[in-house]
Image (cartoon, rainbow, N blue to C red):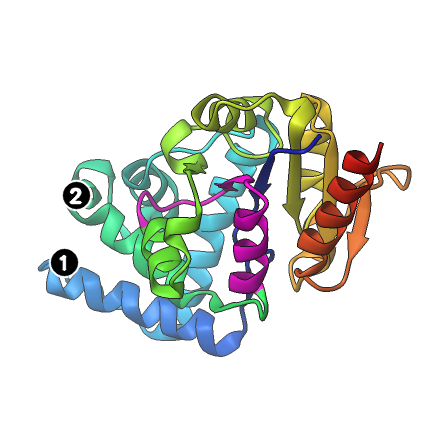
Amino acid sequence: MIDTVLFDMGGTLEDIYTDDASREESAREVLRILREKGIAVDMDVPTAVKKLADGWDRYAAYRGPTNRELKPEEIWGCYVLTEFGLDFETVKPFAEELAHMWEVTYYHRSLRPGVPEMLEGLKGMGMKLGVISNTASLYQVFWILKEYGIRDYFQDVTLSSVTGYRKPDPNIFLVSLNQVQSEPSTCAYVGDTFSRDVIGPQNVGFAVTFHIHSHLTKSRDKDVPKDVKATYSISDISEVYTILRDQAIRDQAG
């Protein structure tokens, strides 16, 4: 019997994507923040876009094989802004400001239609609900859940930036399970990538996995074996509720 449903954030509860406009705007905002902190950077926006992309590539080369997440001051001070001539100690006081800005500017974000109704249905079933998210910001996920008006549905929000582990590492799932006090055998996980949101919970022993397609799915699942399958592939987030509701009805009927 499923009693807990845990969700990925970006691409699952919310639609997110990036484009040239958001990449340029996020670079512009980095330059603005640096100027506000009294750091003179003689750089135009196209150059900043390129140097920031290179910095994130350097960080991805570290975190990809390790599934580790560093703190914002390490990410920005040791990887992303090194080509700007900045270092850990310089960036540390405002690293979270940069991290938060980046998450809400580099990505276009909007709540998927039907999410509040789906969460309300699961809550009515008595489900424990939580979020497990890979993010380079300490607080942005909490902030945007509140902005969407859905923060109070979740008993737990577990972030890679806080735990230091990124999905699909088992530890980030185990932290969440311990915080909601659930066994994996009674849990369902909902996400938009096979590489993180299907393989990860399956390796920990989750009873059910849901996969929903997003703008990020293809780019993040390039090397996933073809035999990796979710329990359910869905096209509408509301199906999480209807499938689990119908399963509960069948279970009760014996």
For residue 103, above or below residue 223: below
Q: Is residue 153 left or right of residue 166?
A: left
Say whether marks 2 and 1 touch (CB < 8 Å).
yes
N-terminal-most mark, 2 or 1: 1
Residue 39, disc: 1
Residue 104 in the image: above or below residue 62: below
Q: Residue at x 91, y 37 (%)?
A: 227
Helix, strand or loop at disc 1? Answer: loop
Camera-side residue: 148 or 38? Answer: 148
Q: In this view of the protein, which residue sits in the foreground, 3 or 41?
A: 3
Amino acid type assigned to the residue bearing label 2 in the image: Thr
Q: Which quadrant is home to the N terminus?
A: top right
User: Which residue reaches farthest front?
Assistant: 253
State how far apart marks 2 and 1 are (Cα).
9 Å
Q: Secondary structure at mark 2?
A: helix
Instruction: From the top left corner, tell me how far across and down residue 18 is, in percent.
Output: 53, 68
Say which residue label 2 marks: 90
Residue 231 sits inside the magenta stretch: no
Task: Name the kind of residue labelled 1 in the image.
Answer: Ile
Q: Is residue 70 left or right of residue 8?
A: left
> With 67 as the anchor, is 219 left or right in this view?
right
The image quadrant that residue 101 belongs to is bottom left
Magenta stretch: residue 125 in it? yes
Residue 244: image tag = none
Q: Does residue 174 appear anywhere in the picture?
A: yes
Please, which residue is most extreme toward the right here?
227
Q: Which residues are magenta?
A: 115-139
Q: Residue at x 52, y 76 (%)?
A: 20
Q: Position of residue 62 (x, y in %)?
A: 51, 33
State the residue in front, 162 or 125: 125
Q: Quadrant of the C terminus?
A: top right
